[in-house]
Amino acid sequence: MFFNLSKLLSFFLVPSNILLLVLLVALGFWLLKFRKTAATLGIASITGMALAAWSPLGAAALGTLEDRFARPPLPSDVAGIILLGGAVDTHISHDRDALTLNEAGERVIETRMLAERYPDAVVFLSGGGGHLFHDGTLTESELARQTLIAAGVDGDRIEMEERSRNTCENASETTAALGDRASGTWILVTSASHMPRAVGCFRAASFAVIPYPVDFRTKSGNINWSATASSGLAAIDLAAHEWIGLVTYHLAGFTEELFPSPDQ
């Protein structure tokens, strides 16, 4: 129920969608001769769109997430590396019959590098599909497995679960699949902006992991102005997705901390 509802509501919680919908409502009021209301909504929408597109607001909100967990010194030996889903475009991979990474593809690349650094470590892939309707495409884990094997990782080292559909289920399904082995030292690989929510979910599952953030979108400690409207809107949309996710997961009881930190 939570998964289905979150997917249905996600469209209406994206800032760029909200601002465009307000503009369409303004157009409707204009056609209905409510000119003052239409003008107010139209100006608010265009102003909001401009701020989201060209100001550093989105990058600042995203950078706060990305700066939460710095890359830690890595131990000399680990039991395994956990790669969370979200780096492979399952639909395009299926349609084109070609492995296709999305903008978070660094997750797979960095996992490959860690696998080389720790040749005896298990590589565990977590991710079924985050789509509302299953259309017969291969799971994120299976496509990531194929990508890693093509990049030179021994397939015998790779384990995976293909049931999880969101971050909360990533943590619970991974913990269940690993069983007693979860008490070992495991590195968690996911996008830097996603790491606070991911760590919160794994802590709630009593699984202590070493956060290894990748896929950074902002410069640390700097004001990031957007060079293009599309990049600014993408930043604020991604930031909103993660901040709303943090609040929602905490209210739903999926995490114990609202904004998990390295000190907790």
Image (cartoon, grey):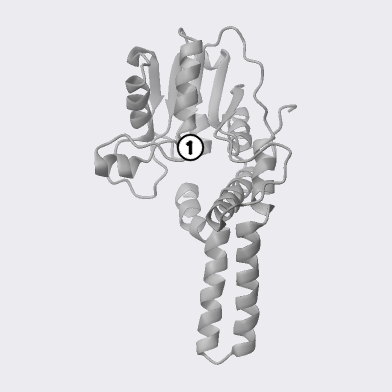
Identify the residue at image location x=32%, y=26%: 146
Residue 48, above or below 263: below
Q: Is residue 258 visible?
A: no
Q: Quadrant of residue 263?
A: top right
Percent x, y for residue 73? 66, 16
Between 84 and 224, the residue placed more toward the observer is 224
Between 37 and 56, the residue placed more toward the observer is 56
Secondary structure at numbered mark 1: loop
Identify the residue at image location x=59%, y=83%: 38
Residue 190, above or below 24: above
State left or right for residue 245 relative to residue 104.
Answer: right
Percent x, y for residue 239? 61, 48
State left or right for residue 135 relative to residue 196.
Answer: left
Residue 132, above or below 125: below
Percent x, y for residue 76? 59, 7
Identify the residue at image location x=52%, y=63%: 17
Q: Is residue 57 visible?
A: yes
State left or right for residue 177 relative to residue 242.
Answer: left
Q: Quadrant of residue 99?
A: top left
Percent x, y for residue 171? 52, 30
Q: Quadrant of the C terminus?
A: top right
Count the labels in the image: 1
* Residue on which disc 1 sits: 104
Label 1 crowding class (10 Å Cα cut-off): few <14, some 14-19, many 20+? some
Considering every residue shown, the one lying at the far bottom of the view is: 33
Considering every residue shown, the one lying at the far front of the view is: 227
Between 135 and 92, the residue placed more toward the observer is 92
Q: Label 1 sits on what residue type?
A: Ala
Identify the residue at image location x=39%, y=47%: 131
